Image (tube, grey):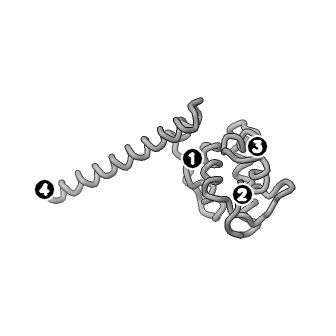
Amino acid sequence: MGQCVNVSTPQNVARLNKAIEDRARELGKSFNQVARDAGITTETLSALRGKGKKRDPGSRPYEKTARGIDRALQWAEGTTMAIWDGRTPEEGGDPAIAEIEATSLSREQKDILISVLKNARAGVLQQAREMEAQQKRGA
C-alpha cells in the first residue's frame, strides 16, 4: 500500500511524527500496534514518520492511510491530515468514537457503529434546524 500523493515540506513530516509518537505513548501502543490497528504496514508508518528505509520526507498520506492512523490513535477523523497540513486538529477528538474504537469489536462492527453515531448526530442537527425554523415562523 502506498502512502503518498502530494509533496510537501519536511516540517509536515516532523509535525506528524511528533504527534504520532506522543499519542502512541499516551495510549501505551508500540509503532507496530499503531500500524496494525491502522491497517497499514510498519514500513508505511515509518515512511510517514520520516523514518526507515523507504522514507520520503515529502510524501503526503493517502486519505485511507490517514483515516487508519486516526482510528488507531483514537483521533477524530481528519486529525492526521490536519496535523500534516499544519492546521490545528480538534482537541481531544470525539470521545464517543474513541470509546467505540477502544472496544474489541471487529473493524466492520466499529465502522457501522461510528456511521450510526454520525448519522444520528446529523439527524439531531437537522431536527434542531427545523425546530428553530418553526420557532422563527411562529414568533
Q: Quadrant of the C terminus?
A: bottom left
Depth check, front residue: 74 or 139? 74
Gap in Å between the C-alphas at discs 3 and 1? 20 Å
Q: Residues within 10 Å of mark 3 (few under 14, many from 20)?
A: some
Could you say whether the residue bearing mark 1 is in a helix, strand or loop?
loop
Could you say whether the residue bearing mark 4 is in a helix, strand or loop?
helix
Q: If you read the primary sequence from the N terminus, does the residue marked by circle 4 or circle 2 appear first?
A: 2
The outermost residue toward the right is 53
Q: Nearer the viewer, mark 4 or mark 2?
A: 2
CB within 8 Å, label 1 to label 4: no
**Relative to 130, 19 lies left or right:** right
Gap in Å between the C-alphas at discs 4 and 2? 56 Å
Depth check, front residue: 108 or 115? 108
**Relative to 103, 44 lies left or right:** right
Numbered label tally: 4
Q: If you read the primary sequence from the N terminus, does the residue marked by circle 1 or circle 4 appear first?
A: 1
Amino acid type, residue under disc 1 in the picture: Gly
Amino acid type, residue under disc 2 in the picture: Gly
Q: Nearer the viewer, mark 1 or mark 2?
A: 2
**Label placed on residue 60:** none
> What residue is pinned by disc 3?
31
Q: If you read the primary sequence from the N terminus, does the residue marked by circle 4 or circle 3 appear first?
A: 3
Q: Quadrant of residue 81?
A: bottom right
> What residue is pinned by disc 1?
92
Q: Residues within 10 Å of mark 2 (few under 14, many from 20)?
A: few
Amino acid type, residue under disc 4 in the picture: Gly
